[in-house]
Image (cartoon, rainbow, N blue to C red):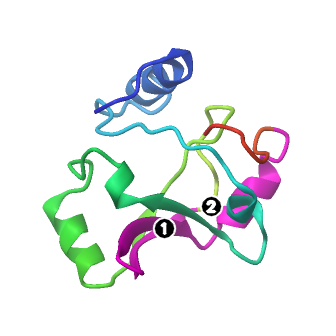
């Protein structure tokens, strides 16, 4: 399912328009950022799988790679609707009966480069 509001509509136009010439988004979520999401020593963004209504945004190959503890390189569109220059790594982590997708590697750099938009309790 795709969340629909003004922000996600702009994002969808960016993805499918001339800027990226991409396909229809498979999943757009909104998440409130907490202090732990913004800390340098954490350098990651957790996305609990049980809060995602679908995993259909991943291909079969991507799901298999993640299940086999491989990392997938992904790109992020920042809050100013520009593709972020540094790739991230997406992994699945199993922590205390909770499975979650985790964006890592360059997450804190992304936060620092977008700090005027990414603050505690911000929605992304």
Q: What element does badge 2 sit on?
A: loop
Q: Is residue 35 above or below residue 81?
A: below
Residue at point 63%, 49% (across, down)? 84
Q: Position of residue 66 (x, y in %)?
A: 29, 74
Q: Secondary structure at mark 1?
A: strand
Residue placed most toward the observer, 76 or 66: 66
Where does the C terminus fall, quadrant-wise?
top right
Q: Which residues are magenta?
A: 87-116
Of residue 120 and residue 117, the one placed in the foreground of this image is: 120
Q: What's the CA distance linking mark 2 and mark 1? A: 16 Å
**Residue at (26, 48) in percent of width and height:** 57
Q: Is residue 98 magenta?
A: yes
Q: Is residue 65 magenta?
A: no
Residue that label 2 marks? 86
Q: Is residue 120 left or right of residue 3?
A: right
Q: Earlier in the sequence, mark 2 or mark 1?
A: 2
Say few, some or many: other residues with alpha carbon within 10 Å of mark 2 (under 14 / 14 to 19 / 20 or more).
few
Vertical side of 121 occupied by 15: above or below? above
Give the number of the disc on residue 102. 1
Relative image position of residue 96 (x, y in whole percent): 41, 81
* Quadrant in which residue 50 is drawn: bottom left
98 up-or-down from 109: above or below: below
- Position in image of residue 81 (x %, y %): 61, 32
How many other residues sit within 10 Å of disc 1, few (<14), some (14-19) or many (≥20)? many
């Amino acid at each position: 399912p795709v969340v629909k509001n003004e922000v996600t509509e702009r994002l969808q136009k960016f993805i499918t328009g001339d800027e990226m010439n991409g396909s229809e988004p498979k999943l757009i979520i909104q998440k409130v950022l907490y202090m732990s999401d913004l800390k340098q020593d954490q350098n990651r963004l957790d996305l609990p799988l049980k809060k995602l209504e679908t995993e259909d945004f991943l291909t079969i190959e991507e799901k298999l790679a993640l299940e086999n503890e491989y990392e997938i390189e992904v790109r992020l569109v920042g809050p100013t609707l520009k593709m972020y220059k540094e790739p991230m790594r997406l992994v699945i982590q199993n922590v205390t009966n909770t499975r979650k997708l985790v964006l890592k590697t360059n997450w804190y750099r992304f936060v620092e480069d977008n700090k005027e938009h990414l603050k505690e309790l911000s929605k992304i």
